[in-house]
Amino acid sequence: MSDTHFSENIIYIGADDKDLDLFESQYEVPNGMAYNSYVILDEKVCVMDTADKRVSEQWLANLKNALNGRSVDYLVVQHVEPDHSANIAALMAEYPEMKVVGNAKTFVMLKQFFTVPDLDARAVTVKEGDTLELGSHTLSFIMTPMVHWPEVMMTYEASEKAFFSADAFGKFGTLDTDEDWACEARRYYFNIVGKYGAQVQAVLKKAAALDIKMILPLHGPMLTENLDYYLGLYNTWSSYEPENKGIFIACASIHGNTLEAAEKLKEMLEARGAEKVSLSDITRDDQAEAVEDAFRYDRLVLMSSSYDGGVFPPMEELLMHLRDKTYRNRKVAIVENGSWAPSAARVIKGYVEKFKDVTLVEPVVTIKSALNADSEAKLAELADELVK
């Protein structure tokens, strides 16, 4: 960011990590990651979270530059995950009078991750609705458990109407990445927060009672304009409603024949006027992107080769992700391929039947090794049902 000041008193002190390959050791981040942190300058100085150890040196330099010789009175720990808490002990050593603000679960978990001398003596434990006076700024604490860890809390600053939202409203990518917010925020949401839609809905209800002018998350850009757009997307995502009408085809093909069938189905659907058809070869494409598209659209087609009497592992990996992220409220179709004893549909159906509010679209199509006239006719029948 060229300008780290949101106002005279709230200053961004986070840092970009452009060299990170996998966030949380599983999510591809081709544009790196931002670890956000903020300092509020008032009669009392308050730091809002620290940053990942990968950016410790830059983060501390940013803080000292913002402080301009002042000391720190408070550190608010909204989220204990190490990408935000790795510098707490160092900050406490640097500013021995500083108090650490968190909730009861904050301090239990901090001790599990780090050895923090004098933490008990310097801890300020807060609960829902408690406030912290900094001078002209007042912080109010909002408990938001399981968005997406049990100790998470968010903070509202009344005078500047700033909502410090922890990991909510975050996205992949560094702050200088020039890309549409929704794409990488959606992938971030469904893969990291997606399981906890009910808890996000509870947060949105609390946020609706606040006069918010800026949302300051722990990842991704600070949101200062058109907030209804971002809040609206979070409401759609967390209520498990499809964001767009469309069909996502997730294909796991061993030798390419199932993929050829998926491409044929895509042609059929587009010829029948489907609003949007997205196709992913999940044996090669990012699984997190597949999870994102499965939640984005209102219809899903799962196409897979059979394998060892079950389903090809890349498809089972996707199914496990969808199960764990509470996939629901969609229409799902199944296409299997098997050369002698097709088994993929049975395994896929076992997962799908456990998803809530999901309608299975018939027919379930079986391909024997490669498309022929009979299986192509069944595929056409399925295309008709999907566009009804």
Image: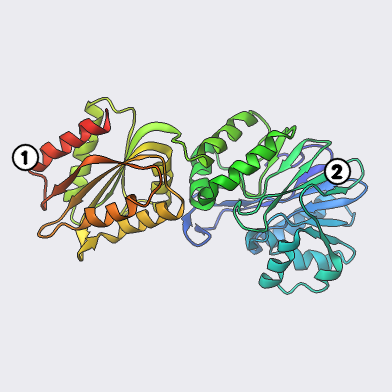
Q: What residue type is labelled 2?
A: Thr
Quadrant location, the N terminus? top right
- Pointer 2 local density, CA inside 10 Å: few below 14, some 14–19, many at least 20: some
- Mark number, residue 373: 1
Q: Percent x, y for residue 107? A: 74, 65
Give left or right: position of 329 versus 159.
left
Quarter location, residue 376 = top left
User: Which SS class for mark 2?
Assistant: strand
- Pointer 1 local density, CA inside 10 Å: few below 14, some 14–19, many at least 20: few
Give left or right: position of 321 versus 184.
left
Give left or right: position of 270 versus 83.
left
**As rendered, which of 47 and 366 lies closer to the eye?**
366
Q: Which residue is drawn at 6% across and 40% down?
A: 373
Q: Residue at x 64, y 31 (%)?
A: 227
Q: Percent x, y for residue 381? A: 16, 34
Quadrant location, the C terminus? top left
Q: In this view, does 9 lie above or below 81?
A: above
Q: Can residue 182 be seen in this view?
A: yes
Q: Can residue 180 be seen in this view?
A: no
Label 2 sits on residue: 138
Q: Which residue is drawn at 11% across and 49% down?
A: 370
Q: Which residue is drawn at 65% across and 38% down?
A: 205
Q: What residue type is labelled 1?
A: Ala
- Mark number, residue 73: none
Q: Is residue 361 above or below residue 119?
A: above
Q: Percent x, y for residue 13? A: 74, 50
Query: Label 1 vs label 2: CA separation?
Result: 70 Å
Q: Percent x, y for residue 101? A: 80, 58
**As rendered, which of 37 and 133 lies closer to the eye?**
133
